[in-house]
Image: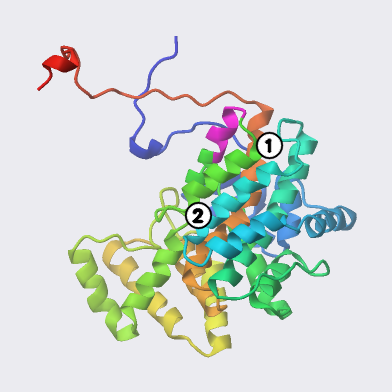
Amino acid sequence: MVKLVIAPKGLAGIIVSETGLSHVDGENGKLIYCGYDIEELLNCSYEEICYLLLYGELPNQGQLEIIEDILKTERVVPKFVLDFIANKAKKNHPMAILRSSISMLSVMDYDLENMSENNLKSIGLSLISKTATIAAAICRVRNGLKILPPKRKLGHAANFLQMSKGEQPEDIIARTLDAALVLHADHSFNASTFTNRVVASSLSDLISSITAAIGSLKGSLHGGANTAVMKMLLEIGEVKNVKPWLDQALARKDKIMGFGHRVYKVLDPRAKPLKQMSKEWSERVGNIKWFNISENLEALMREKKGINANVDFYSATTYYAMGIQPEMFTVIFAMARVLGWVAHYIEQMQDNRIMRPVSSYIGPKGKLFMPIQKRK
């Protein structure tokens, strides 16, 4: 007989399973992928991180070239998916379009019932590649532009940028996005990854699990937070408005987006490099205002509430300085995190048991049933 344990609200502090993919050290502000500190992994490309999370070690040159070639080969998305994006992405939530587009890939010639590790890695790399193509297509349509085909010669981040912007990016732009993708690739059992693993535990297919994860990431308390951060900064408008805006928001007990974390007790290790990227890009484009507003707000929140910025806070201004519209921020988050979802799905299959918690019933009991003729 399993002993019942009442878990804290939101499963706070509950260990539900084991993982060898990533470790969030909340006390010391560390994020580790497969044994490597995230600060060191910022020297790697996103393609290298793909290999790391799928195979457990960083690739040598030959292994990296194989992964790069697979990702380049798998970029093409079926016309019916692109037609759907062209017709629906302009007026609908971009994450809803992403979710539906990924789900539509289920009708492709994938052997989704084959749960072998090699097959799952093959499908997973295809989905990682196609997610970037879909994300770029959504970006183009929302800007009133024609969807562009991928370019095989470019790396993963650079190809997304050329598809979304219509021109081959400078190396520094591609490297900045590449670093952001590395920082967002995985983060232990966050809400979307846990959702992914719950669906996987039922032996549903990989695309179903990733579709469910996208639905979770869409929420404003998860992946949607960076969009909410930028909207907040736009509402503040000027550096001089930061303190009165914050005082009023705190008096109303509003949630200040981009601050605090359920696990990190100190500064989110992803926030520091993103802050530097935000500053560099703001200076590069000649508009430092949004960074200055962010830095002032960060300092006041630490002073007044003792709360640090998280990954969403400076990723918002980084993407905005790069010319990416706020409503696309979460789509780019998904473009990075799909790697983590694939890796966690594969790990779940290695020692699977369906996740089936119990609930504590607080409703009424013993009600007297009445036939419909006697009900008032």
Q: Is residue 285 magenta?
A: no
Give left or right: position of 332 versus 234.
right
* Residue 14 pos. (x, y %): 43, 34
Say which residue appears at 25% left-offset and 75% top-offset.
245
* Residue 324 pos. (x, y %): 55, 74
- Which quarter of the figure is the N terminus placed in? top left
Q: Is residue 197 magenta?
A: yes
Crowdedness near tag 1: few (<14), some (14–19) or many (≥20) residues, C-alpha within 10 Å: many
Disc 2 and disc 1 in contact, CB within 8 angstroms: no
Q: Mark 2: which secondary structure?
A: helix
Give, as a three-letter code, the residue at label 2. Ala
* Residue 4 pos. (x, y %): 38, 18
Q: Relative to 18, is 299 above or below?
A: below
Residue position marked by numbered label 1 in the rendering: 346
Q: What secondary structure do most residues of the magenta stretch adopt? A: helix
Give left or right: position of 314 versus 170.
left
Quarter of the view holding residue 134:
bottom right
Q: Mark 1: which secondary structure?
A: helix
